Image (cartoon, grey):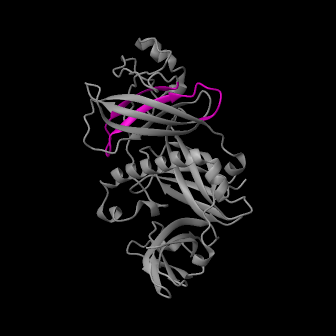
């Protein structure tokens, strides 16, 4: 079933906030990773990096305190609560039996039965909050979790959040979420402030459009390679949510990708830069596929004159779009561009923008990609947005 604009706004309103927050978190993590890259990579816009590559690093497995409502208070019983090997962390080791050093305080999330505590840890970019959860219910649930970092006096120094998508009944998750500041005392306590749940089930018809995903090592960054075939009778955009799993089958991260207008029967074989720090041995699974109605204004599409593929200084494909403002007023333009191989499969997306284009004015805008020029056969404008300056 395809979601039109009104249906999307009505039926997935709860998801919009969650996904915008996922996007903001991913951008924050990406910004931290980019701080150590070379100057050329830093100049490129992350949102165009559908084929980008990112530096991988591994955060050490840590022992987490328990906020579980049925915790007995001793380390042995806490360890027993984790059950069998499915409760292993990123390194495949069982959580430590050391006593919990973060005690839950009174609050909406402090005794939540699903979330097993949290702790502040260091990483190569931003500090991270590590946490674990187990879905103890009998429905597939997506979580929104608020965390607070407090000093010895109990004063909140910083807060952050995490989103976890489509956790099946009984599934164990051990993940991290970013704290977007570099100036934090790592001895701060971590509290679970609140836990919100939304019962969700992935649409099997939409999932059928996905041809799987896998984590690949890149020269600079890691990336997720994935395929989509539009089985819908209409053009549609996509939001894909990926789960990333360690060798023991524990979910250790999530990521996402968005696609602009894909024609009925059209195929995509693309990559998206990893926002999470995981190894190329991590297993990738498509958790959810959603259709997005992102059709552009037909009048704005009529302003497009051509799309040609050039080559930049790094021998990457460079989409060049020529447009003429056919309206009577001045507009700002935002153009989504698809790049295709010789078989007609979309292998990358880019965008370009132009400000203050006057009536009847012709201008040229250029996008950025990380795809070798030789791999691209043609480009096509997928959608155009016009806004008043």
Residue 252 versus residue 364 in the image, above or below: above
Q: How many marks?
A: 0
Residue 361 versus residue 194 in the image, above or below: below
Q: As drawn, is 84 to the left or to the right of 27?
A: right
In the rendered image, residue 214, in percent from the top left (x then y), is placed at 55, 49
Residue at 65 percent across and 31 percent down: it is 139
Q: Quadrant of residue 296?
A: bottom right
Residue at 55 percent across and 46 percent down: it is 242
**Residue 290 visible at all:** no
Is 312 in front, or is 297?
297
Image quarter of the C terminus: bottom left
Residue segment shown in magenta: 114-141
Residue 241 versus residue 113 in the image, above or below: below
Q: As drawn, is 56 to the left or to the right of 185?
A: right
Q: Quadrant of residue 157?
A: top left
118 magenta-colored: yes
Residue at 55 percent across and 21 percent down: it is 84
Residue at 50 percent across and 82 percent down: it is 329
Q: Quadrant of residue 379?
A: bottom right
**Residue 234 visible at all:** yes
369 magenta-colored: no
In the rendered image, residue 335, in percent from the top left (x then y), is placed at 51, 72
Outermost residue, right direction?
A: 233
Is 29 in front, or is 330?
330
In the rendered image, residue 299, in percent from the top left (x then y), is placed at 60, 78
């Amino acid at each position: 079933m395809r979601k039109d604009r009104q249906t999307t706004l009505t039926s997935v309103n709860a998801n919009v906030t969650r996904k915008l927050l996922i996007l903001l978190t991913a951008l924050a993590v990406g910004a931290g990773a980019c701080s150590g890259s070379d100057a050329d990579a830093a100049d490129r816009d992350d949102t165009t990096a559908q084929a980008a590559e990112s530096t991988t690093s591994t955060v050490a497995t840590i022992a987490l305190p328990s906020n579980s409502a049925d915790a007995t208070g001793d380390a042995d019983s806490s360890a027993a609560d984790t059950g069998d090997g499915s409760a292993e962390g990123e390194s495949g080791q069982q959580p430590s039996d050391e006593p919990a050093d973060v005690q839950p305080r009174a609050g909406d999330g402090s005794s939540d039965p699903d979330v097993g505590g949290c702790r502040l840890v260091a990483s190569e970019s931003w500090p991270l909050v590590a946490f674990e959860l187990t879905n103890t219910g009998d429905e597939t649930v997506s979580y929104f979790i608020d965390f607070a970092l407090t000093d010895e006096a109990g004063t909140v120094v910083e807060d952050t959040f995490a989103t976890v998508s489509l956790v099946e009944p009984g599934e164990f998750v051990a993940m991290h979420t970013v704290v977007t500041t570099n100036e934090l005392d790592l001895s701060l306590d971590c509290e679970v402030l609140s836990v919100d749940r939304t019962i969700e089930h992935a649409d099997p018809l939409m999932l059928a459009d996905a041809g799987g995903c896998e984590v690949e090592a890149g020269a600079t960054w890691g990336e997720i390679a994935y395929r989509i075939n539009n089985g819908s009778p209409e053009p549609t955009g996509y939001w894909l949510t990926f789960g990333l799993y360690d060798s023991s089958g524990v979910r250790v991260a999530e990521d996402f990708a968005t696609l602009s207008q894909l024609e009925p029967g059209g195929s995509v074989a693309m990559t998206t830069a990893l926002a999470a720090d995981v190894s190329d041995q991590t297993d990738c699974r498509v958790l959810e596929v959603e259709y997005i109605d992102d059709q552009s204004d037909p009048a704005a599409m009529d302003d497009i004159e051509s799309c040609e593929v050039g080559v930049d200084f790094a021998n990457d494909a460079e989409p060049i779009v020529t447009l003429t403002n056919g309206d009577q007023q001045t507009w700002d333009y935002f153009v989504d561009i698809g790049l295709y191989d010789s078989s007609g499969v979309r292998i990358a997306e880019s965008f370009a923008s132009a400000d203050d284009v006057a009536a009847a004015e012709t201008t040229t805008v250029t996008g950025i990609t990380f795809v070798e020029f030789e791999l691209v056969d043609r480009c096509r404008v997928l959608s155009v947005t016009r806004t008043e300056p």
